Image: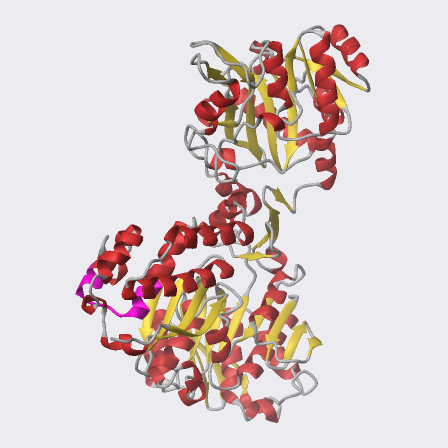
Amino acid sequence: MTRKNIQLLRVTHLKGPNIWTYRPVIEAWVDIGELEDFPSNTLPGFYERLTAWLPGLIEHRCGVGERGGFLLRLREGTWAGHILEHVAIELQNLSGMQLGFGKARQTSQRGIYKVAFRTRQEEVGRAALESARDLVMAAIEDTPFNVDLAVARLRELRERWYLGPSTEHIVAAAIDRQIPHIRLNEGNLVQLGYGAAQHRIWTAETDLTSAIAEGIARDKTLTKTLLKTCGVPVPEGEEVESPEQAWEVAQEIGLPVTVKPTDANHGRGVFTDLRDRKDIEQAYQAADKEGNGVLVERFVKGEAHRLLVVGSQVVAATRGKMQTVVGDGQSSVLQLIDLQINSDPRCGEEEEFPLEPLVLDKEPIVQLELARQGLSAQAIVPAGQTVLLKRNGDLAYDETDLVHPKVAEVAALAARVVGLDIAGIDMVVQDISRPLPEQQGAIIEVNAGPGLLMHLKPAEGEPRNVGKAIMEHLFPGQDQGRIPVVGVTGSGNTTRIARLVAWLLHISGKQVGLACHDGFFLNERQVDASNAMNWETGQRLLINRSLQAAVFENDSRMILSEGLAYDRCTVGVVTGLGDPSELQEFYIDDPDRLFTVLRTQVDVVLPWGVAVLNADDPKVVEMAELSDGEVIFYGLQADSADLLSHASTGGRTVFLRDGQITLAKGKEESILMPLHSLKPSKVAQPQMVLAAVATAWALDIPLELMGAGLRTFDAKQEPNF
């Protein structure tokens, strides 16, 4: 039997809220051809092949709502479009990008489906779709498919294009707080919040991180001087310029000593517990290659610890462990390292692993330690003999709950002295649960932009939600980094409503951005006269740090082809359903499907926001129950059944009574002005005026300013009237 191949007719990355969900998705229009007549339960061996390749599909709950739900549907019989959705999700999960959302819906054209699934990165999502199509066809036709190769390719794309794990964690914490985010480059520069309320992060650096403080932290000598001045315990030491001087200073300080670069990070080139001239001079040569200068310091007895300070609090702490191997009488040091250290499943070169592989060629510290023990990499170690490799290994063992309050106090003080809002404080102590003076502990480094992975995925101990702490630091209390955002969509007057609302916000004293059919505006200035109803222009508004409010006109085509430019809005306006025949190219060919498109604007209204709905359109009235926030109805007739019903429950309404623009909350009414007192262009468009007034009311603009704005918004500001 010959079956038509699954064809991908169109693949779109919907970057913002859309008809499927609040989050970005890949939407594919899929033609399954003759497979429309062959659901999964009619394909011999298909179920067995698919589940053997992707056993994780058992976790997909599907519409059944329980584990194994999708497999139940697969056994009972489901179609290729639905299967494609789940396979694309599972392939992304296997690549390390955990996701769950997906939907498949048949269009009015036989055999053609719209398939949508969540993705965190467009390139990964598109590649997952292609691989899913090939895998499903291989399972149908009983031909080989290399799942491991497909997953490896997706993992490669994820590592190339997606956020690093630390930044991803911070963004996830922002999402938990409903703080919006925008990725500003292909790296880890991310904006949190919108407009004037935003902050920016670059992994563990923020826009509150001082460049001067970063410079101080890089200069270890200056850092020590400042810390010592403020009473923070630091090891005595001196910067040196030659191996000979290193030995002289070591004698003055008193042996043993530590030799390290003045400006290196991550423990590179740090040699500890040095007791003779040869070791000190060798350590100088190695440390000099890692930085722009060398320090000789008093050796502090104990283990290295990293304390993460966010704001004024220590939020996490880890300890480094001494790295050793134990001989077996047969294996060399090099072999023992591979057998006992690098074989640990927690060990790997990628950022997701808490422990780093130990590579001798890259570790002069280890080579020096071996030489001090009279060993080389190729030496066979007698059975039972312990060989020291590194005194301070990966800082990957959580000890947050053990930190003494006085120790935390000193660490927070060190961060403040340097001037960092987020800092990694390195200290050496014998016991982190005791105050520093009791054990002669000391702070040895203050690091800007500290690594977070050790706290997120420690090798041992409890992971710490440091992203939450960073969010609380940047956005204290209930702050979500939001500015008033207004979205206007529907069938009539949306451009005029958007422009009038922007004007009312402007005269209320806010810096306002507007993206609409007439162009891109900042306050009264038209920056670009081309149609600005697109996702990219919308993002330009939200990135602008001077904006205190933003207004967007969104038509159905934008929602269907790109998604909204913002995640949620303060006010969402829907003016009317309109004619679905204009959207037939999107398979939107009846009022119910068009309703699904326009409801997107209501779906994204914030819980404390307002949906402004046209009570003269029955289908728009139905959207009221979809709003997470309040609803304000507007309409031409004061005696409209829907307006009266809404008012009877205490709801807000805006309407015309005897030619007067009237605002009512329940039975309490306020007259704004006579409609005929406005310019003829506005009198001719009363619904436009009522929608703008209702939106201004939702934004708490006083009635006096509303009136002034309606009167002063003249032809100069409305060239298309």
Identify the residue at image location x=65%, y=82%.
Answer: 713
The quarter of the displayed image where residue 248 is located: top right
Q: Which of 382/234 is in front? A: 382
Q: Nearer the viewer, residue 69 or 707?
A: 69
Principal secondary structure, stretch drawn in magenta: helix
Q: Relative to 19, is 524 on the left or the right? A: right
Residue 327 position by quadrant: top left
Q: Over which residues does the magenta segment extend?
A: 72-85
Q: Does the magenta stretch include residue 79?
A: yes
Q: Residue furthest left?
A: 76
Residue 101 in the image, given as x and y percentages of width and height = 36, 60
Residue 241 in picture, x, y percent from top left = 82, 20
> Split into 4 quadrants, where in the image is the C terminus?
bottom right
Q: Can residue 148 be seen in this view?
A: yes
Q: Which image quadrant for residue 146?
A: bottom left
Residue 191 location, x and y as percent?
59, 54
Up the image or down, 36 lies above or below 238; here it is below
